[in-house]
Image (cartoon, rainbow, N blue to C red):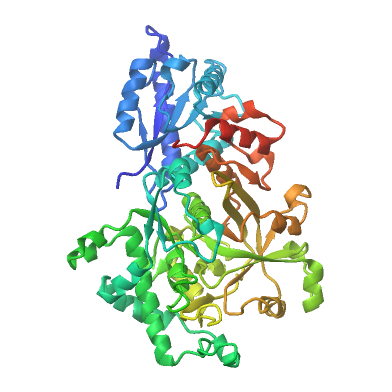
Amino acid sequence: MNYPKIGIRPIIDGRQFGIRESLEDQTMNMAKAAKELIESNVRYSDGTPVQCVISPSTIGGGAEAAKSEEFFSSQNVCATLSVTPCWCYGSETMDLNPLTIKAVWGFNGTERPGAVYLAAAMALHAQRGLPAFSIYGHDVQDADDTSIPDDVKEKLLRFARCAVAAGQMRNRAYVNIGGVAMGIGGSYCNSDFFQNYLGIRAEWVDMTEILRRINLEIYDHDEYEKAAKWAMIRCPEGMDINKEIPLNKKIDPFEFKKPHSQEHKEEDWEFCIKMTLIVRDILQGNPKLAEMGWLEESRGRNGILGGFQGQRQWTDWLPNGDFMEAILNSTFDWNGKKEPVTVATENDGLNGVSMLFGKLVTGTAPIFADVRTYWSPEAVERVSGWKPEGKAENGFIHLINSGAACLDATGVSKDENGKGCMKPWWDVTDDDISAMLEATDWCSANLGYFRGGGYSSHFRTRAEMPVTMVRVNILNGTQPFIQIAEGYTVTIPHKVHKIIDERTDKTWPTTWFAPRLTGEGAFKDVYSVMANWGANHGAITYGHIGKDIITLASMLRIPVSMHNIPDEDIYRPNTWAAFGTKDLEGADYRACAAYGPLYK
């Protein structure tokens, strides 16, 4: 695979006969140190360490800058990091490629004015309309100090994480399987947004393609047998809520809500497992299909994410996509641990993008959920007799959907201290997988919602964990913006959970979310977070990653309209300061409008 790489540009004072010669080793060592730091700490979404390439030589002028660009053009470089300990000639050495994401690290030392070059370079980037991130250590270092200060490490790594996330999206595809679900705005695929802001091709596949592949048996039969045996053992059936609902022929003359027979349920399992294999193959391809004679299908769609409409033209008569979505979005399946395959429920591609952002910067599985209900402390106490406490004391938001959430959201994987967590997929253990499966059962689909049947994953998040809820929205059809809410999943007494959870649908997975409050604006209280959220869905990723999402958004030129990240943690291109330094949200909007989308 030709991975998107970070190109490191060692910039040097080009004056011969003493100055350049004295700086060669120090400059190149800065580049090597940055490469080592990034490759040791940042991974692609498939778990491979990120690759950095260094210019063939130090860059002291335009000729060497051109040679560097020529080399990088053969290496799939998506971002460049220019490093220098000294004064250099800015316009002669800067990266002029409009498609690379840029940063400059100027060494903070007094022997040579690396900081002066950094300032000059930032001014030049601003003049040329090329946003660049500025990296400059807080404390002065000695000229022979080869260490990288912690504050510089933080900026280097955040830049690398986010730039590589952007690079991995470029020239990939979003595969819509179906169309708009139930009139949901996020289900409408704006191909201009995907192309101009993310570099992603939008593709459409009719849902009947799944039926064609089932009927013609275009899937790996051996893998199906393996998956079916695994599901029979590891995916126990839960409650059948349909047995609790009396039939009423006046309301339901066709008896859609009549509980399915065991034989029918077994057929549903077979269908759901095949659909899981097929949707994965549609997105990613499968060489096994070529061996079977299906060469076109074996290639896949180059999908980095997908969406499945389901409701209602499919689910009114066919099994729902909950099992498929839950398993693909999780960090494991019948083959063991795996990279999550991002699939958006109800074909909500904007929430799918939000999920993808989280996966790319963390390697963890994102949770797809309805942002369903705000429970005030007073309401909780009124219906349950329990007064919320701890992180739940200000109330919480009920995150729930019809069983499509990743199983990692159970919160039963354990970190090194034995606490519940959600891990990068490459760190998931067999014990974690067993715990997640044991914490989940699979309920027969509520036939009132899903006349065609199917299965919904059913669990509750069992750990208090730091998480970040993200949503991409589009304003007036053309302007994307992002909302971010850091907070915690909260656990509540089981009796209380049962009382309030069953007011929605007791067969679906539930996560209780308490956003971190600031006392101001949209985060003055939990109600205000819910009231200001821009859509019915949210993507929840493990960890407090809001600062990474803000940095990534600035690279893509998507403004952030709502967040609870401290100002000191916000890291955007240096030129954002030209649009204002007091109202950072307003400055972000103005900067993004001025520069336009990354791939315009």
* Residue lying at 36% horizontally and 45% vertically, measured from the top left: 171
Residue 137 in view (yes/no): no
Q: Is residue 326 left or right of residue 512?
A: left
Of the pair 591 and 258, the residue shown nearer to us:
258
Front residue of 575 and 152: 575
Q: Which quadrant of the figure has residue 317?
A: bottom left
Q: 193 or 4: nearer the eye?
A: 193
Which residue occupies 29% across, 34% down? 74
Question: In percent of the image, x 55 and y 86: which residue is there?
Answer: 239
Q: Residue furthest top?
A: 17
Q: Nearer the viewer, residue 85 or 386?
A: 386
Residue 389 location (% of width, % of height): 77, 67
Q: Residue 565 at x, y = what percent?
A: 66, 45
Q: Where does residue 118 sit, x and y in percent of width and height? A: 53, 21
Residue 14 percent location from the top left of the image:
40, 12
Residue 67 visible in rendering: yes
| Quarter of the image where the C terminus is located | top left
In the rendered image of this protein, does residue 12 appear above or below residue 411? above
Q: Is residue 211 above or below residue 423?
A: below
Q: Within the image, what quadrant is residue 229 found in?
A: bottom left
